[in-house]
Amino acid sequence: MPSIEEIAESIGFSEYALIDAADVITSKELREGCNAQACRKYGSCWTCPPAAGTFDELQPNIRTKRAGVLVQTIRDNIDYYEDWEALAETRDLHNEKLDQLANELRATQTGVLEFSTGGCDVCGTCTYPDAPCRKPAEQRLSLSAHGVAVGSTCKKAGLDYSFQNGRVRFVGMVLFD
């Protein structure tokens, strides 16, 4: 049976690191960035505020888990401020790989939860607020909604999270019991 690191590498993540769930750094202040003025996903899906719940209500999604893996998809030669198509392509590729990782870990781990940037878009168009989530077991939870300090958590896990001209990093996390 391959290790979690071998699975992450075979899927094609640029960087990855195992992490204890207790080492995921969260902040209520970071969560406050999830608001209608600051984020296009606010009020648009089940995994983002206000539907997702409060900071305190979401903490058990992290604090009741044992461990996990942080992953990064890195793309060079991209203008973060101009090349929206390349950014979207990279985000979509990252989320496809993240879904694959979560699905593979569900075969060997219990209580698997998947976290990404930007809220869930598994279904394309979310049923929020008119109907229940169509795929609750496959949701991509929002790192921001949970107040995850992505840079600090990456640093704690030994991953670089610096911003560099021409380079983007998409970060995901999969936690399990």
Image (spheres, rainbow, N blue to C red):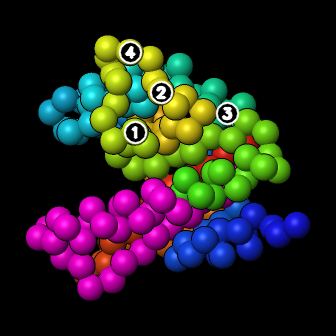
Q: What residue is rendered at 31% in x and 78% in y? A: 167
38 or 12, which is in the foreground? 12
Q: Is residue 17 magenta?
A: no
Residue 59 coordinates in the image, percent (x, y) = 57, 28
Mark 2 in CB contact with mark 4 (< 8 angstroms): yes
| Residue 38 found in image quarter | top left
How far apart marks 4 and 1 lie (CA) works out to 13 Å
Q: Secondary structure at mark 1?
A: loop
Question: Which residue corresponds to mark 3?
Answer: 63
Question: Quick one: label 2 or label 1, which is nearer the N terminus?
Answer: 1
Left or right: 111 as drawn, with respect to 59: right
Question: According to the image, label 2 marks what residue?
Answer: 134
- Above or below, 161 against 56 in this view is below
The earlier-in-sequence mark between 4 and 3 is 3
Q: Earlier in the sequence, mark 4 or mark 1?
A: 1
| Label 2 – label 3 distance at C-alpha | 26 Å
> Which residue is denoted by mark 1 in the rendering?
123
